[in-house]
Amino acid sequence: MFVREFGTTPDTVWAAPGRVNLIGEHVDYAGGLCLPIALPHSTVVAVAPRTDGIVRLRSTAGEPWNGRIDDTAPGRPTGWAAYPAGVLWALQDRGGIDAVFVSSVPIGAGLSSSAALECVLAAAMSPDTDRTALAAACVRAENEIALAPTGGMDQAASLLASEGHALLIDSSSGRTRRVPFEPTAHGVELLVIDTRAPHRLVDGQYARRRAAVERAARRLGAASLREVTDRGREGADAVRSLKDDVLRRRAWHVISEIARVRLAVTALEAADFVELGRLLTASHLSLRHDFEVSCPELDTAVEAALTAGALGARMTGGGFGGSAIALVPAGETPEVVENARRLAAERGLPEPAFATVTASAAARQVS
Ligand code: GLA
């Protein structure tokens, strides 16, 4: 495609993965802990630098974009090109590029197709830059150019995760740690259920949740809800004493979810997938009832998985559509798939798509 579009060959080809978060949802912007894995699905870029400041971006999934880096500003360009153009802007790369993107990360499925798009270009353009710094540049692209007020979990996963491991991210210190995640070695599979309910982070709900979390922290006289969590019982009592019912439930989700991540790490270190499953389901209930970011499609996928024998299931990512994950005893996946299809059909919901996934590698050069 690069040769056809530009009449030359690319200098380099890189791939960067999408992610699913095992647990630790809607806590990254509160300084919390999250535990994603990188997916086997990835976005590939073929790229050649230019010297005349012109940027030409092509994708199989969207309109071509031609411009200059000076055309990049908050809210510009719009559409998919905002992410790669935003990365060049954040890296202050003024030379220009020709680039072609092809992706196997389902778009709009809550599996971080946009982070994969950012991270693959950042890694290809700055292979020698520290990955944590690259992740920060990608977050700036997303927040300041694409105007999606997301935290940093997705970019960290795409740039720092590793095969056979989940990545424990401490969003308050920026530190990360690898935690073994090899369910298949223990007779368990991780199933992703893409509900095909369109998921949008830009529609204001995500921003409203983030604002509520920040307001709750201010009311409790803390810089973040992480700080409140670290006050232990005293912090939990303070959250319980919040008068505003909505704010109290939002904050309770965050502090209880951070606690669940800690327990999940302990469970994974002991390869206790029954306990991990219990925590996933508890996380879903908290996201559904206290944080209110689930939707009928996600609740149906979780219910179908649990009634067909999953050890645990939850929505993953920002919510309001997108994907759920289920931990399923090996051999029982066909039943879970069948049940999720049947229940969705019965309720008049879109037919979900399914993938069994393993923890895969972060951004890497492929040729
Ligand atoms: C989206 C954001 C992340 C994170 C999750 C919710 O994926 O991009 O930063 O906030 O939602 O956990």
Image (spheres, rainbow, N blue to C red):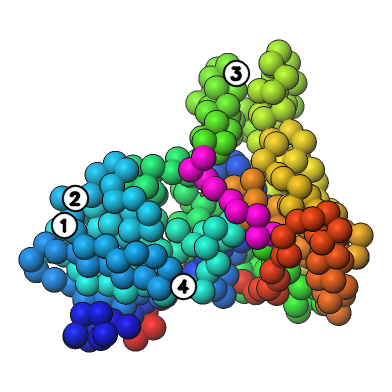
Magenta span: 195-203
| Residue at the disc numbered 2 | 71
Count of marks, rendered view: 4
Q: Residue at x 76, y 73 (%)?
A: 189
State which tag comes first along the sequence, 2 or 3.
2
Q: Residue at x 47, y 49 (%)?
A: 152
Amino acid beneath label 2: Asp
Q: Position of residue 225 (x, y in %)?
A: 59, 30
Q: Marks 2 and 4: CB-CB under 8 Å?
A: no
Which residue is at the front of the view, 184 or 197? Answer: 197
Quadrant location of the C terminus in the rendered image: bottom left
State which tag comes first along the sequence, 2 or 4.
2
The answer to whether 48 is drawn above or below residue 204 in the figure is below
Task: State how far apart marks 3 and 1 are (Cα).
Answer: 46 Å
Tag 4's secondary structure? strand
Which residue is at the front of the view, 51 or 241? Answer: 51
| Residue at the disc numbered 3 | 220
Q: Which mark is residue 68?
A: 1
Task: State how far apart marks 2 and 1 are (Cα).
Answer: 5 Å
Q: Which mark is residue 103?
A: 4
Q: Quadrant of residue 88?
A: bottom left
Amino acid beneath label 1: Arg
Amino acid beneath label 4: Ser
Tag 3's secondary structure? loop
Give the main secondary structure, helix, strand or loop, of the magenta stretch.
loop
**Residue 312 visible in the picture:** no
Q: Does the magenta-highlighted stretch encompass residue 126?
A: no
The answer to whether 135 is drawn above or below residue 258 in the figure is below
Which residue is at the front of the view, 38 or 297? Answer: 297
Tag 1's secondary structure? strand
Amino acid beneath label 3: Leu
Nearer mark to the viewer, of 3 and 1: 1
